[in-house]
Image (tube, rainbow, N blue to C red):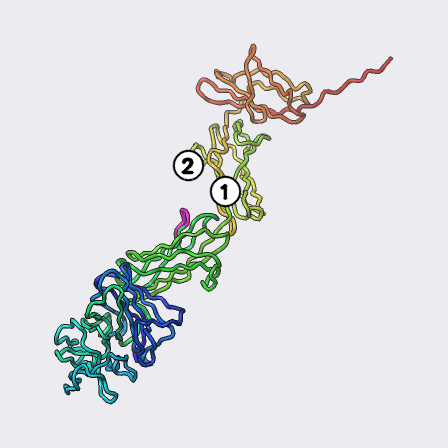
Amino acid sequence: MRRIALLGAVVLCSVAALAISSSASAALFPQCPPVDLNAGCQFLVNVTDTETTIESDPTQGPYEGADDALIGIVNHSSKAITSLPLSAEIELFGFEQDGLCGVENHPAGVCVVMHENIEKEVQAEEGEPCPPAIGPCAVKEPTGEPAKTEFPEALVTAGLIQPIGRYKDGSESSGYEGPRTWYTGIGAFHSFATGTGVVNFGPALQPGESTYFTLESPPAGGFGSASTLTTSLTGGAASGPSISVTQGTPVFDTATLGGENAATANGGTVTFGVFSDPACTAAVPGVSLAAGKLAAGVAKSGSATLPVGTYYFRASFGGNAEHQAVSSECNESLKVLAPTTTTTAQTGAGLTGPSLTMPQGTAVTDKATIAGPLAKGATGTVTYTLYSDAKCTKPFAASPAAVVAGVAGSSAAVKPKPGTYYWVASYSGDASNAPSASRCGSEVLLVGLNAKLGLPAPKGCYSLRRFIAHPHAPHGVKLVHFEMLINGAKVPARLDQRHTTITLIGRPKGTFHVTMIATDSKGRKYVDIRTYHTCVPKKHHHKKK
């Protein structure tokens, strides 16, 4: 008994590919008549205009109880089928004189006496039904078989093929032929001397027609050569065997076939499974990826969006004419992370805001806020980077800070030289939260030369909330423009006889940071910043006389 390995098949007229699938149904394929132990076909070849698949009936084993296979073929294409080349890494055509007519229960109405047996003894008249006591027999010679068709002499001499006799025209028969088939082109496939051959149909199998034949070994192991299947996930900009994506990002899987001539493999179906465990045994309920057709050795799945969690993927290829069925390893993993946003707030000289103007030497820090559906438990790291250009490509300073229970630490303090700077905070993400970063340009830090521009020194509290400043330039500098900020917000300011009025009227009691920014004739900026406190004027009570 030969052990089953694989089988390959291509329909000559339609250049179709083969795929194999196991059917859980106990229904028999009626394209084959009852033969010995079988009530129907063990395997059924389905031919369409686009591909050829092979289905199996799990209730039917080898028809003689060892290894011989009863195979049906049905033409669902729009063209006639004249031949079916088969190849396998088994002795697929290693006929042993135990074909259709070598079993106890012959197919009803098709078995006939051979004209001449293998010992060249003339039998009864051709076409006469097989009597129970008669020796080897076979079906009637199919229409269209060329006269004196013989098996390769070397294979017959070596005993690898054992014909049971000849038809009247001198053609050899193996006893495995069906009612309208004969075999040619039997030869070696890889290391198997009878692993390849052609099943011919006479007359040709027209659209809608079916017939059957037998082979030495069934195609339970697949077709053609041994194959491998590797996979790669894609989601957003990420691609590879293990990726992370933000929830809501469509993800698909790509399978690449390996093995002999894999790059030209076309036809057949690759299915894709999504699992919750790293052994790929627990399928995720309600989650599926659409199967893909193999083209040039590659098949892509449909896409799906998945909830937050960790998933594992496996692809399975059903096989085609040149390649065995194969599954990928369970070595793909996908992490779906909750979305996050990162915003920032910079602080310097008591001021906090998206746009700050500071004198040189002032310490400035940045602090990020992480937001998202799972951000309250976020961990990881925020990296703060201060850039010296508006496109955030030239880093000036950088520092990391830990994120604990959703709260990010502040950056290290920076004291940059005069210029304009831009903060970006990048959150690393963690096992549940996706990375995110603040937008370049969302925070601007302007640093000017430190100068005393005429702001009065703070003295106690200003109960009237209005005071005079006398702007003046540093020695040897010609100022051409100045502006005033209160708590970081620009306020109207104009010179009147070389002084300007700073008013806090209408503002609540509290602390106010007043910034004066001056620009000289060369475009350089000077900054003076002071902190003032306001209070309510005390009421004076006069004693009555």
Residue visible at 69% across and 20% down in the picture: 463
Residue at numbered disc 1: 383
Q: Nearer the viewer, residue 490 or 269?
A: 269
Secondary element at tag 1? strand
The amino acid at mark 2 is: Thr
- Image location of residue 426, percent across then percent down: 49, 42
Q: Quadrant of the N terminus?
A: bottom left
Residue positioned 68% across, 18% down in the render: 464
Q: Amino acid at mark 1?
A: Thr
Residue 524 forms part of the magenta stretch: no
Q: Is residue 64 left or right of residue 304?
A: left
Badge 2: how crowded within 10 Å, few (<14), some, or many (20+)?
Answer: few
Residue 453, how many percent across, how many down? 55, 19
Residue range in magenta is 235-239
Instruction: Farthest residue to the bottom: give it.
Output: 133
Q: Secondary structure at mark 2?
A: loop
Tell me: residue 124, above or below residue 241: below
Q: Is residue 11 above or below residue 339?
A: below
Circles 1 and 2, Cβ within 8 Å, touching? The answer is no
- From the top left corner, tell me how far across and down residue 170 is, in percent: 13, 79
The residue that disc 2 covers is 393
What residue lies at 27% left-to-right and 77% top-to-bottom? 216
284 and 99: which is toward the camera = 99
Q: Nearer the viewer, residue 256 or 476?
A: 256
Q: Is residue 236 magenta?
A: yes
Please tell me in which quadrant of the rendered image residue 34 appears.
Answer: bottom left
Q: Residues within 10 Å of mark 1 (few under 14, many from 20)?
A: many
Residue 71: quarter of image: bottom left
Classify the position of the C terminus by image quarter.
top right
